[in-house]
Amino acid sequence: MAWRFTGVLALAVALAACAPTSLRPNTNGVILQDDFSNENSGWDKHTGSDITTNYADGQYLIAVETPNLDAWGLAGLDVNDVKISVEARYAAGPLDNSFGVLCRYTRTGAESNFYFIQISSDGYMRYGKVIRNVPEYLNAAGDFEPLTAIAQGESGVNQLTATCQAQRVSFSVNGQNVGEFEDTELTHGDVGLLAGTLNAGGVQIKFDNVLVTQP
């Protein structure tokens, strides 16, 4: 699935994920733990000319060829309170990119809803929500703002975390809390990984060691 930053749905992609599954956490609160070594662990698989969301070399790859377009891969869950954390690394393309995590993803027809955080390889961050395909940025700047906690450049590896607990949505980057807000529109849904382009296409981001827990 993808959306342009104008908020207009850009591309409807038929993805191979199973129907969302409700899972009980284990005794340690773990709902899902995945190093992407098993290509049948349940994440979306799609390869196309504009976007790719698929397993690659023991990681999860999101590649976006078209400018001003975001794409995401979903785990196939349906959970209420949830925390998702993942390692994300630059793989190719411009450093002026975006990538992150999302929670409480739901979809009705062609309309997607979720909470998200995005960072860029050149040191910027924003977070917010998407309701009926329209993004709203809820960080102080209302769009991308500098964040020193980001590991920048082609060698940068960043730990991204989103927590959806009751009405509170919070985010951290490399262990630093970077923002939160309260919202009542979304109460449950899937979790996912997100990457996108800004002015130039060709972005590739790889994700590894995702951990989904009950907060």
Image (cartoon, grey):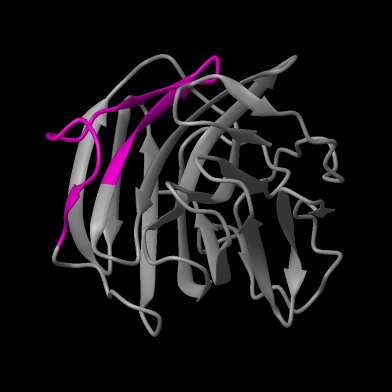
Horizontal and vertical percent for residue 204?
Answer: 58, 66
Left or right: 146 in relation to 201: left
Magenta stretch holds residue 210 = no
Q: Estimate the x, y position of residue 29 in percent, counting from the top left.
A: 51, 57
- In the image, farthest residue toward the front: 200
Residue 78 at x, y percent in the picture: 66, 35
Magenta span includes 135: yes
Total marks placed? 0
Residue drawn where x is 55% and y is 19% of the image = 8
Going 47% across and 50% down the picture, which residue do you hit? Answer: 101
Q: Indicate the quadrant containing the N terminus: top left, top right, bottom left or bottom right.
A: top right
Image: 91 above or below 26: below
Q: Which quadrant holds residue 61?
A: bottom right
| Residue sitting nearer the eye, 156 or 128 | 156
Q: Is residue 169 above or below residue 179?
A: above
Front residue of 58/91: it is 91
- Which portion, as a residue range, is magenta? 126-147
Which residue is rendered at x = 50% and y = 55% of the image? 213
Which residue corresponds to the image point at 20% horizontal and 35% vertical from the top-left?
Answer: 139
Give the left or right position of residue 170, taking residue 77 as reference. Answer: left
The quadrant where residue 174 appears: bottom left
Q: Is residue 156 above or below residue 101?
A: below
> What x and y, as percent, mark residue 87?
46, 71
